Amino acid sequence: MKQLIDGNFWAYLDLAIFSGVFFAWGGIYGIFANTKKIDNKALKRILRIGVSIICVWLWLWIFCIKLLYPISLAKYEYDNNIYDVEKGFVESVELDGKDRINVIIDGVEYKIVYGSADPDSIEIGKDIDKDDYVEIKYGKHSRFIFDFSKQKSISEHS
């Protein structure tokens, strides 16, 4: 699981850096180059500052907060052993994009990092399926599952 979390983290970090350079070059530099022709200094400043702020906030929201933060929190929790253990029945399992599996266990949604190219990755239906009784180890705040195991029955572990 560590390889999947690390790989996912570095992929999203690379994406955030590349998109930041793209937004800076395409958005901010582009607006500065295109507003050189405007004679009104106040309008030029408003456009430059406004578009720059919009580009930076879009980049922060989409790439840093929505994409990078959840996996970086999971990586931090995994590396520092900040986790809880829970047992319960799997209510639903669904693939979310190319790199995440959403699992609902006893009404609470958790995520698992998924790697289709990795042969050790989780297989839906084989490793984890609906109505399985499982024990999971998950990040306290990120709700990413670090480890899971199928349990035979509730009575064995009571």
Image (cartoon, rainbow, N blue to C red):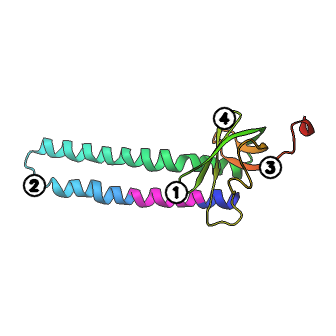
Q: Nearer the viewer, residue 97 or 10?
A: 97
Q: Position of residue 12 (x, y in %)?
A: 52, 57
Cα–Cα span, label 3 and label 1: 28 Å
Circle 3 residues within 10 Å: few <14, some 14–19, many ≥20: some
Q: Nearer the viewer, mark 4 or mark 1?
A: 4
| Residue at the image point whose x is 47% and y is 48% from the top | 64
What residue would you read off at disc 1? 12
Q: Is residue 13 magenta?
A: yes
Give the mark nearer the N terminus: 2 vs 4: 2
Cα–Cα span, label 4 and label 3: 17 Å
| Residue at the image point whose x is 86% and y is 37% from the top | 154
Q: Is the Cβ of the residue at disc 2 closer than 8 Å to that at disc 4?
A: no
What number of labels is visible? 4
Q: Position of residue 32 (x, y in %)?
A: 21, 54
Q: Is the Cβ of the residue at disc 1 closer than 8 Å to that at disc 2?
A: no
Residue type, mark 1 in image: Tyr
Residue type, mark 2 in image: Lys
What residue would you read off at disc 2? 37
Q: Is the Cβ of the residue at disc 3 closer than 8 Å to that at disc 1?
A: no
Q: Find numbered disc 4 in the image and state the secondary structure of the residue it sits on.
A: strand
Q: Nearer the viewer, mark 2 or mark 4?
A: 4
Vertical comparison of 22 with 109: above or below = below
- Would you identify the image quadrant in which residue 46 lies? top left
Vertical comparison of 84 with 14: above or below = above
